Amino acid sequence: MALPHTPDSNPIDYIDDEDFLALEVPQDVRGERLDKFLGGALPDYSRNRLQAWVEAGAVTVDGKVTKVRYLLRGGESIKVFPQEMPEQFAFAPENIPLDVVYEDETIIVINKPAGLVVHPAAGNWTGTLLNGLLYRYPELKQLPRAGIVHRLDKDTSGLMVVARTDIAQTSLVRQLQERTVGRRYLSWVWGEVPSQGKVLASVGRDQRDRLKMAAGSSQGKPAATLFRRLAKGLFSDSPVALLECRLETGRTHQIRVHLESLGFPLLGDPVYRKRTPGVAKSLPFQRQALHAFALSLQHPATQDIMTWFRLPPQDLIDLLPMVGMSESDLPLESALLASIKNDQRHD
């Protein structure tokens, strides 16, 4: 049996006819809004959730679907058909293709594509890396966050490590806290960038826009990003640079925020773009030009130092000639390994 619905209401899933909560509206609540009444009558459910059910057509008043602002007259019969909310499916396994760079009984290293969200959250309850991990590695359901210990932004590509055991997860979290996990990124930015530099600026929630982060925030956490310029280029007479960035901390949007604070916003960044030149509008590139191309850490079981390296995906390779660069400007794995070993000696 399908629930009654109006032509403009959202379709809802099939619910057995007996699977509802029945309420009788007292006369003394005459004039009260439907959602307010439901909130008081069904305290086990949040008001937001009840409002969502009303809008989805899962609540009927005298057999009819209505709106949350409906004013009760008193004496009506209400049926509430509880709906499973999106977050209830957040940890469901999904057959999502994964580019597994390395795996053993302890850890997994993934090369995440741009466009893939790492962990379920509002707006992305399914189709995430976590869902794909649970499908391929069912045992991860026993671990917090399915073994995920760090994240990449949705539109940032590159290498991530995932734990397969409690011991490995504890070890990786400790290494991240102690800043001994080596994470290097390739980033394409606007501006005349010096040959190298270091950004030391706290990163915290932007007080004017809660969806963004800000550098130098008094309420932020300490953050440090080192960078060196690998190549220079031009797009419509605007200078562009290819940078290798090395994280000493791992704050949300850290590289994007730090580089923009210096006047070097990432190409294609849809959020941190205040200092982006006008010619950026004609550049056919639709995501922040950022790729986590190298990852090094101490293996939780063997204690060996391991390093993985992945060149950027095709969209970033295609970007190179657009800004006057070539694949020869990308770092070689041999040079990278030598650089990492040198850094480890000086850390």
Image: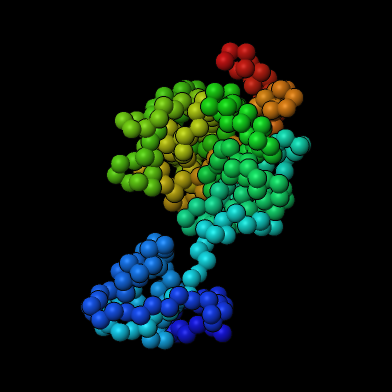
Residue 178 % position (x, y): 54, 23
Q: Nearer the viewer, residue 334 or 292?
A: 292
Residue 5 % position (x, y): 46, 83
Which of the 4 image quadrants contains residue 294?
A: top right
Which of the 4 image quadrants contains residue 17?
A: bottom right
Q: Tell me which residue sits at (46%, 38%) in the image.
A: 252
Vertical placement of 125 versus 222: above or below?
below
Residue 122 % position (x, y): 47, 55
Of the 4 image quadrants, the one containing the N terminus is bottom right
Q: How are the colours assigned in the image?
A: rainbow
Q: Tell me which residue sits at (48%, 43%) in the image.
A: 267
Q: Tell me which residue sits at (41%, 27%) in the image.
A: 222
Vertical placement of 11 versus 147: above or below?
below
Residue 103 % position (x, y): 75, 38
Q: Nearer the viewer, residue 12 or 192?
A: 12
Left or right? Give the position of 208 relative to 183: left
Residue 250 can be seen, yes or no: yes
Vertical placement of 323 versus 336: above or below?
below
Of the 4 image quadrants, the one containing the C terminus is top right
